[in-house]
Amino acid sequence: MSNSIFIAKLMGPMMLVAGITYLMNIERLKAMGREIMESPGLLLVVGFLTLLLGLVLVNTHNVWVADWPVIITLFGWMALVSGTMRTMFPTQMVSIGTSMINNNLLLRSVSVLQIALGAYLCWEAYLV
């Protein structure tokens, strides 16, 4: 089994379930986001975990192809940048995060995108 298939088998269901959960519970998602923004320690932990996820993905799957595995690579790089920003620039990230939490259309759109990407990764990992 290739790295791409293995990682898609992990990421696909996780993204699918998370996206559906967020979409069904937007207010709870917003409350959790505010909780993270109000806790410097929690923001730092989330930042380091996101940074770690990004490093794992970039180091195990830095595949730049014109095919579906590039989704995993892009996700890894986004996690790497996001985790780095959260740990190094927490004040600015709280400001950005707060404005994102207050944007219902953005939250719903990201949830739908997450569902679509999760379903697509599941398709590629389990059915193709």
Image (cartoon, rainbow, N blue to C red):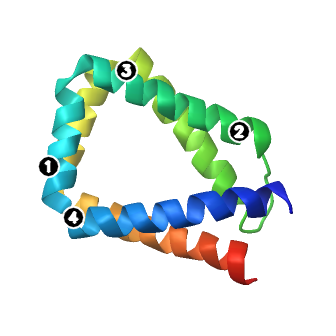
Dot 3: element: helix
Quadrant in which residue 24 is drawn: bottom left
Q: How far apart are marks 1 and 3 (CA)?
A: 21 Å
Q: How far apart are marks 3 and 2 (CA)?
A: 21 Å
The nearer-to-camera label among 1 and 2 is 2
Picture coordinates of residue 12 (x, y %)? Answer: 57, 65
Q: In terms of secondary structure, where does tag 1 sit?
A: loop
Q: Which of marks 3 and 2 is in front?
A: 3
Residue at the bottom extreme?
Answer: 127
Residue position marked by numbered label 1 in the rendering: 102
- Three-letter amino acid code at the position of disc 1: Asn
Task: Using a 10 Å C-alpha cutoff, classify the residue at mark 4 as few (fewer than 14 neighbours), some (14 to 19) or many (20 or more).
Answer: few
Query: Label 3 sits on what residue type?
Result: Leu
Mark 4: secondary structure = helix
Residue 99 visible from this viewpoint: no
Q: Which percent across, then down, holds residue 57?
A: 68, 42
Residue matched to label 2: 58
Q: Where is residue 92 in the image (x, y as percent from the top left)?
A: 29, 24
**Is the C-beta separation of discs 3 and 2 under 8 Å?**
no
For label 4, the residue is 105
Q: Distance between the residues labelled 3 and 4?
A: 27 Å
Q: In this view, does 126 lie above or below 33?
A: below
